[in-house]
Image (spheres, rainbow, N blue to C red):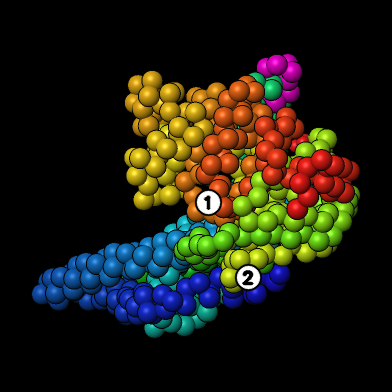
């Protein structure tokens, strides 16, 4: 993507705030004449007030200079407020859009993209854009004002000296442009290393990561890996800063030559300049260095910012699947039937995981899915829950009106996700308007009521990061209880009792049957639950789904 295209996309995010941007520019324009007046007043102070000894004029000029200074400071504060308001609004809408886009992707996105990559774009990349807009751009606007004001004043004082300064500024701008490109490449590389650093920290410093490191005696290797990324990040950071510093040193050194040059040109090539004019010209020339450097910084800041925005655009341009209709009420009535015909799946690596599955899941049915490990049971579960689109075949829905499968189905996956919050908050994620009675009912169903009644803070007991303050079996049951509180017509439970003893496991499945009366229940389990004569038992065998003999065929 070219820099212009990225910039154009970036500017579209500022369009809703164009009036604030216009107001900010108006303030900038107002401050230009104030900036021009100052050096002209200074020349009058020197030539007419000080050298001519006109005290009355001197007092008047000094008062005027103070008034102008105060006015321009007040305007400057107003501009800071405006720029920050715009910056924060753009940041918020960018974050909301990127979050929403990432959230609505197909499941493959989450298996291919690391969590830290998503976090980096959402947090540091967008923050970089904000810093650029509210910091660098604002500073640059001030510099531009100063530069234009100084430029006009210089032209009014001596056009010959002014042209000399402008030529020098142009050469320096070209030089800086070359450095900026290099810094942009380094910024991209640096961001990749920051993402790796985040990923290693998140993986290795989690409970699982630490246990893995200690038990496999690879903690040293984990540290080495982390330090290696830190070292590479350090190297890139040094290179990035040295390139930046080199640019500023060259520019700074060039500016050191300016005063002698002005004195020399004033004394040789240009005649008739007053003492005040020469002094003010030198002051202006020196003052020119700061805004020019800051504008040059804007150009390199812009390149770094464009690199960050380009990464954000990659997420903004992700396909936008239809969002789940969360407001849709569960379809009442006779329940929902599913008909799978020739359903097959293949993940990104091209291996066929499922092939040609024909399966009927009538409303009110209970289907138990069995099969060897890796045979594709979870994949089938995700397809039935509407989270994975089958590569081949069809899944037909009856009794759901115009709702799609993912609007009416839910799954309790093999790996539960619990939040670092209380039991109550975890349950309420499924349904906010839940009564105390509902909560106790689902907890009793999964046999967690006894545990909760013995906890010091009952339902308000925190369960720690990923629920790790609970046992594996308690975590599984809490996840099932939470799912029971949600609205659905089709429920898939994937190995949700693998950590339970046989008796408790059967009790949980029995409770599920009661909750699912009239709805469609799919149980994926290695260890068979108690089978009811009306249950359908499906064997997923090397990709092909078959209904085992002796059980009720759908
Ligand atoms: N996201 C993925 N990307 C690529 N391959 C995958 C992905 N998820 C699963 N697989 C592969 O698909 C096959 C079936 O996996 P699946 O999880 O559906 O099996 P399963 O029968 O549920 O296994 P288990 O009983 O061990 O849980 C496996 O070979 C697995 O390696």
On whether residue 216 falls in the magenta region, the answer is yes
Q: Tell me, yes or no, whether the two marked residues, 1 and 2, touch with CB atoms within 8 Å.
A: no
**Magenta residues?**
214-223
Percent across and percent down for residue 319 are 67, 67
Mark 1 lies within 8 Å of ligand 1 (Cβ measured): no
Query: What residue is drawn where x is 84% and y is 60%?
Result: 342
Q: CA distance from mark 1 to mark 2?
A: 19 Å
Residue designated by label 1: 123
On whether residue 57 falls in the magenta region, the answer is no
Q: Is residue 119 above or below residue 281?
A: above
Badge 1 crowding class, 10 Å Cα cut-off, few under 14, some 14 to 19, many 20 or more, is few
Badge 2 crowding class, 10 Å Cα cut-off, few under 14, some 14 to 19, many 20 or more, is some
Residue 488 vs residue 268, the one in the foreground: 488
Residue designated by label 2: 6
Q: Main secondary structure of the magenta part?
A: helix
Residue 265 visible, this orientation: no
- Describe residue 295's horizontal placement relative to residue 51 as left or right: right
């Amino acid at each position: 993507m070219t820099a212009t295209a990225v910039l154009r996309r970036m500017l579209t995010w500022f369009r809703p705030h164009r009036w604030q941007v216009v107001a900010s520019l108006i303030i900038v324009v107002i401050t230009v004449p104030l900036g021009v007046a100052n050096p002209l007043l200074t020349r009058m102070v020197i030539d007419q007030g000080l050298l001519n000894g006109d005290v009355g004029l001197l007092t008047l000029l000094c008062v005027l200079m103070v008034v102008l200074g105060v006015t321009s400071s007040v305007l400057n504060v107003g501009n800071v407020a405006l720029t920050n308001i715009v910056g924060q609004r753009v940041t918020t809408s960018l974050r909301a859009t990127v979050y929403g886009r990432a959230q609505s992707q197909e499941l493959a996105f989450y298996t291919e993209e690391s969590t830290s990559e998503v976090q980096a774009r959402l947090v540091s990349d967008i923050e970089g854009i904000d810093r650029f807009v509210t910091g660098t751009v604002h500073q640059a606007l001030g510099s531009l004002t100063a530069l234009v004001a100084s430029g006009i004043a210089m032209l009014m004082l001596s056009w010959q000296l002014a042209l000399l300064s402008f030529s020098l500024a142009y050469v320096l701008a070209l030089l800086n442009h070359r450095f900026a490109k290099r810094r942009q490449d380094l910024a991209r590389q640096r961001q990749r290393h920051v993402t790796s650093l985040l990923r290693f920290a998140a993986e290795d410093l989690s409970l699982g990561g630490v246990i893995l490191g200690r038990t496999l005696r690879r903690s040293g290797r984990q540290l080495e890996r982390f330090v290696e990324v830190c070292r590479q990040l350090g190297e890139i950071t040094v290179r990035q800063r040295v390139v930046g510093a080199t640019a500023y040193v060259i520019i700074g050194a060039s500016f050191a030559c300016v005063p002698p040059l002005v004195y020399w040109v004033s004394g040789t090539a240009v005649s008739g300049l007053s003492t005040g004019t020469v002094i003010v010209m030198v002051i202006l020339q020196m003052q020119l260095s700061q805004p020019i450097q800051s504008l040059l910084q804007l150009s390199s800041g812009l390149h770094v910012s464009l690199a960050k925005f380009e990464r954000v655009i990659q997420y903004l341009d992700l396909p936008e699947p239809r969002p789940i209709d969360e407001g849709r009420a569960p379809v009442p009535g006779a329940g929902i039937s599913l008909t799978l015909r020739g359903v097959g799946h293949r993940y990104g690596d091209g291996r066929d995981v499922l092939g040609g599955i024909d399966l009927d899941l009538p409303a009110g049915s209970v289907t138990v899915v069995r099969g060897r490990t890796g045979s594709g049971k979870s994949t089938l579960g995700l397809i039935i829950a509407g989270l994975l689109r089958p590569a081949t075949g069809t899944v037909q829905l009856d009794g759901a009106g115009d709702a799609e499968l993912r609007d009416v189905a839910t799954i309790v996956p093999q790996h539960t996700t619990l939040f670092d919050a209380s039991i109550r908050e975890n349950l309420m994620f499924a349904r906010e308007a839940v009564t105390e009675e509902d909560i106790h009912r689902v907890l009793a169903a999964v046999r967690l009521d006894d545990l909760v009644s013995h906890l010091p803070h009952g339902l308000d007991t925190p369960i720690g990061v990923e629920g790790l303050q609970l046992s594996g079996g308690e975590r599984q049951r809490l996840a099932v209880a939470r799912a029971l509180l949600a609205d659905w017509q089709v429920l898939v439970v994937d190995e949700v009792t693998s950590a339970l003893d046989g008796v408790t496991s059967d009790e949980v499945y029995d409770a599920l049957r009661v909750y699912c009366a009239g709805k469609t229940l799919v149980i994926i389990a290695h260890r068979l639950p108690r089978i009811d004569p009306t249950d359908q038992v499906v064997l997923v065998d090397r990709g092909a789904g078959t209904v085992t003999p002796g059980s009720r065929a759908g």
